[in-house]
Image (tube, rainbow, N blue to C red):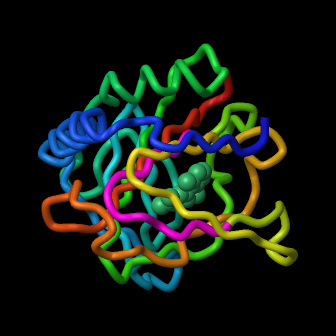
Amino acid sequence: MAIDILPERFDPAAQRALLADIEAVVQAAPWFAPCMPRTGKPLSVRMTNCGPLGWVADIDGYRYQPAHPDTGEPWPPIPQLLLDLWADVSGIAAPPEACLVNLYGPKARMGLHQDRDENEFGAPVVSVSLGDTAVFRIGGTTRKGPTRSLRLASGDVIVFGGEDRLAYHGIDRILAGSSTLLPEGGRINLTLRRVTPI
Ligand code: MD6
Ligand code: FE
């Protein structure tokens, strides 16, 4: 397995159900503002998490932790729809431990990066897009070298594993107004991860 794209894996009714679950997650674990380590430069997305562990980014670095950085509360559980998705597509018997939730406004983007804060690269990252379409860029496992661009629309799932688990990727831009799923527009991305060794 490398990168599997599952277009509209969630149909519009399932997207609405998943969005309602995420709204409940956000009630329990409000959006926080991540920043770059050392410089403290804010990222343009807002974030929250569900699951036993959540990914955070602050002046001290990037890490997984069991509690919300602002409230100190444990992260809420991962919704069943996402546990079912993981069981269907990950190829991994163990459940996901973290679900990072990213919120993009019309001007938000995400620089080219690798996901390497996990201690289990044998498990894929499973990503779900909701709301406005994103222009996603993916390259190889070094920062230089060719990249390609693909669009991720609401309901699309990508399974990011195998030799591409450590591929560089990022979000170039959001196509504002391309979906009406989110009442205020924008895009939500959910990434399910295994953090500790299986
Ligand atoms: C996003 N996604 O789609 C950002 N990371 O907003 C990611 O950074 C990502 O989609 C690892 C695997 C899949 C992803
Ligand atoms: Fe990533």
**Residue 165 in magenta stretch:** no
Vertically, is 24 above or below 61? above
User: Which quadrant of the figure contains the N terminus?
Assistant: top right
Q: Position of residue 165 (x, y in %)?
A: 73, 46
Identify the residue at horizontal 32%, vertical 78% (top origin): 106
Residue 15 screen position, x and y as percent: 29, 40
Q: Which residue is more in the foreground, 63 or 191?
A: 191
| Closer-to-camera residue (57/188) | 188
Where 146 falls versus 50 (above or below)? below
In the picture, measured across the screen, residue 18 lies left or right of residue 111, that is left
**Above-or-below relation of 13 to 155:** above
Residue located 58% across and 44% down the image: 158
Q: Residue at x 75, y 32 (%)?
A: 122
Q: Nearer the viewer, residue 118 or 150?
A: 150
What segment carries the magenta color?
Answer: 126-137
Residue 51 in the image: state x and y as whole percent.
37, 33
Image quadrant assignment for residue 67: top left
Q: Does the image show residue 21?
A: yes
Residue projecting furthest to the top: 93
Image position of 169 (left or right of 128): right
For residue 160, what is the image quadrant? top right
Query: Which quarter of the rendered image does ligand 1 occupy?
Result: bottom right
Direction from residue 193 to residue 69 in the image, left or right: left
Report the predominant secondary structure element of the magenta stretch.
strand
Residue at (77% x, 66% y) in the render: 139
**Residue 136 lies within the magenta run:** yes
Q: Is residue 47 visible?
A: no
In the displayed structure image, the side of residue 139 where residue 98 appears, left or right: left
